[in-house]
Structure formats: C-alpha cells, structure tokens
Image (spheres, rainbow, N blue to C red):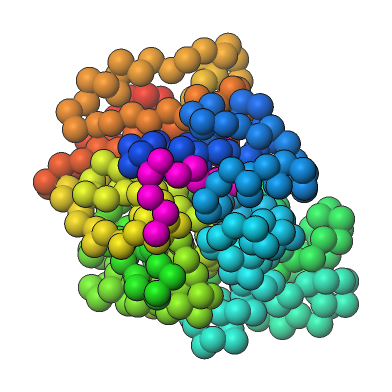
Amino acid sequence: MILPPATLGMLGGGQLGRFFVSAAHEMGYKVWVLDPDPHSPAGMLADHHLVVAYEDYAALDALAAQCAAVTTEFENVPAATLDYLAKFVPVHPAASAVAVCQNRIAEKTFLAGHGLPHGPFAAIRDDDDIRAADGALFPAVLKVARFGYDGKGQARVADREQALAAFHQFKGEPCVLEKMLSLDGELSVVLARDEAGAVQCFPAAENRHRNGILDVTIAPAQVAAAVPAGLPAQAQAIAERIAGELGYVGTLGVEFFVCDGELVVNEMAPRPHNSGHHTIDACDVSQYEQQVRALCGLALARPRQHSVAVMVNLLGELWYADHKGHGAYREPDWSVLHAVPGLRLHLYSKHHARPGRKMGHFTVTGANAAQVLELALRARAAIGIDDE
Ligand code: ADP
Ligand code: MG
C-alpha cells in the first residue's frame, strides 16, 4: 500500500491529469507530471512538472526514482515508455492494456476475440483492404487506428471510392472502417479495478455528442425512450468484463452505442473519462480519487451518486465573439453560469482557446432529473452555446 506523503507520477498533463493531481493532493500525496507542454493544465498544479517528451529516458529515470507508482491520463503515451518505467516502479494500467485501448485495430480485435458486442468493421492497412471490405459496411466511418480524439482523424464515407480518398488523405495510416450505425443513444461506464480484481462501477451515464465531441452527459443515464430499462446494468457488466480481460488496474472508461435497443461497445479509454467529470460533484467519491486508490493499492470506494447530474463541456469556440471561432477573442462571462443554482464551473486554465478544444465544463446537480437537465440546457444556451 502506498501511503501519503508518497509521490505519484502522472504521464500526461491535460484536464484529466489536473483532476487527478487535485484528488491526490487532497489525499496527501505529491504528484510529478510529465508532459511536453510547458502550460499543461496538470503540470501547473503538480509538485513538479517534467517538461519533456514521453521518450526522454533520462526524465523517465528521474520520474521512476521520485515516484512510488506511475499512471497515465493520456492513452497515447508510447507503450515503450510504460514498459520502461515498469522495470523500476509499479505502473498502472499496464502497457499491455493501454496498447489495446490506444489502437482501434487492436481494440476491435480484442472485442471480437472476447465475444464482446462491437459494430461491423474492417482493419485497413492498404488500398486492397478497402477493395476487399464487405460492401455492407457502407456508408461507413474511416478512423485512423491511432492518435484520433474528439472526432479527429475520422471521415464519413458513402462508398469505397470515398473510403480510398479518405485513406489517402490520412496518408495511408492504418485505419478501421466502421459501418455507420444508426444510434438510439450513447452510454458510458466508468469503473475502477484494483490489483486483486475487485471492481467498482459508477452508474452508467448518457452522452450526447456534437461534431464528434462530447457535449452533454446526463448521469445516471435516464431510462427513457432512448434507453431501454436494464441497459445501464448490462453496460456495467460488459465494462467489468472488459476490465477483467485486460487485467486492468486503475480507472477505465467504456463508451457504448445503443443500436436497435442493444449495446455495442464503441471504444475504451485507459484513464478517467470526460463523461465521468460529474463524479466530482455528484458522487461521494470521484473517478479521480478511485484512480489514486487503485494506483496506491488502497481499497476502492463503493461510489454512491447522491445527486442527479448534467455535465456540459465548454469548448474553445466560446472564447470568440461569434461563439464559433471567429471574431474578437475574450473570456466568456462566467457570472452568467455562477448565477445558476446547483451549478459548479470547472476551468482547466488552458493557455489558449482553439475551436473544439476542451477548456472547461460545468455540472448542474440536483434531486430531480428533468429539472436538472432543463437548468443545465438553459445555462448552456445562456453562456452562448447554440444548436445550429
Ligand atoms: P473519439 O475517439 O473521437 O471519441 P469515437 O469513435 O468515439 O472517437 O467517435 C466519436 C463520436 O462519433 C461517437 O461518440 C459517435 O457519436 C460518433 N460515431 C463514431 N463512430 C460511429 C459509428 N460507427 N456510427 C455512428 N456514429 C459514430
Ligand atoms: Mg469516443
């Protein structure tokens, strides 16, 4: 068991890492963050920030020497970096689990190999793979196998011709070609698993995306028209199986599509998940505290969600006069949000707002799901997010 005031290592310095640093600090730990960006949101809060590349082995030696254990908030940390650190210090999740989640071909192959529900797909490594792909996959989405996020590295393609063109635009990077599914909705499950295999799930959440980026999370998932009763519990069971098969230790996010009333696993995130931000404000333990607990070998908490929550992401375009990324650059008027009862604003102190960049979020909590959703959507409109 790793106890305070031990130092923990975090690979990646984004907002997920920032919330981990906060949780670890509250529990009495120190945190070293490694991230090449000198302005990284987590680096700013950390006890020490190594501003170096993930392959800087001298810095990895320093991290291993200082830290009692190391984790990640960024799925694209090179597996070799995790493997190297693991020679000197406990690393959770393991490189092997991260490697599956960071490559869409490995991820889909893992799901298929374990009989887990997934959408129809083909692995694309060259033009011939596209020519040979099942015609029933079209219309489809072509996604680069690695380094895609927030809808980046994806192209919607109507037919084989368009798929070839998109593949060339991605410079022949390995891809997956996924059948475009008609979605009734999207769910996610965040869980934590410890080294002994004990798992604690948060209630499943319902997610609404906009331009391929998470927009709104409603938690717990509203078992209404779009979400058949029983599906949230099924999603938890599937996520738990995935964590077990991966030998996963830490906080894991699993995204699901709901298609024809059934669950399809979309993807896994080997870290806390955007759709689990509300656990800070609406649960008695957050996904970040669970990450600390799993990393340090403390008993996982059994999460209790005490409030209904709606989380709204705040993207960089809000910082521009037209709220779409054009015109004068200025800070949004946060007083509008602070006036809303039950609303908590979280800003990540990112250096510069770019359209589509996650800059912050707010969470509205309360007792009545319909009321909380209405308040949150009204606040979302009031700050300037429109639905065109
Ligand atoms: P990211 O890594 O950017 O989150 P995802 O694969 O999760 O990439 O895609 C982002 C969003 O795009 C999904 O949450 C979903 O709304 C939509 N999407 C992705 N793939 C499909 C698909 N095969 N069919 C329908 N919608 C999809
Ligand atoms: Mg996703």
**Front residue of 218 and 92:** 92
Q: Is residue 369 visible?
A: no
Residue at x 34%, y 73% (from the top left corner): 198
Q: Is residue 350 left or right of residue 132?
A: left
- Residue 61, x across and y down, in percent: 71, 47
Q: Is residue 18 magenta?
A: no
- Total marks in image: 0
Magenta-colored span:
1-15
Q: Quadrant of the N terminus?
A: bottom left
Q: Is residue 376 visible?
A: yes
**Front residue of 66 and 298:** 66
- Residue 230, x across and y down, in percent: 25, 76
Please tell me in which quadrant of the rendered image residue 20 appears: top left
Please tell me in which quadrant of the rendered image residue 58 appears: top right
- Residue 200, x across and y down, in percent: 31, 66
- Magenta portion: prevailing SS class: loop
Residue at x 49%, y 42% (from the top left corner): 7
**Front residue of 245 and 142:** 245
Please tell me in which quadrant of the rendered image residue 256 appears: bottom left
Residue at x 24%, y 62% (from the top left corner): 302
Residue at x 15%, y 42% (from the top left corner): 366
Q: Is residue 99 left or right of residue 53?
A: left
Q: Is residue 104 above or below residue 329?
A: below
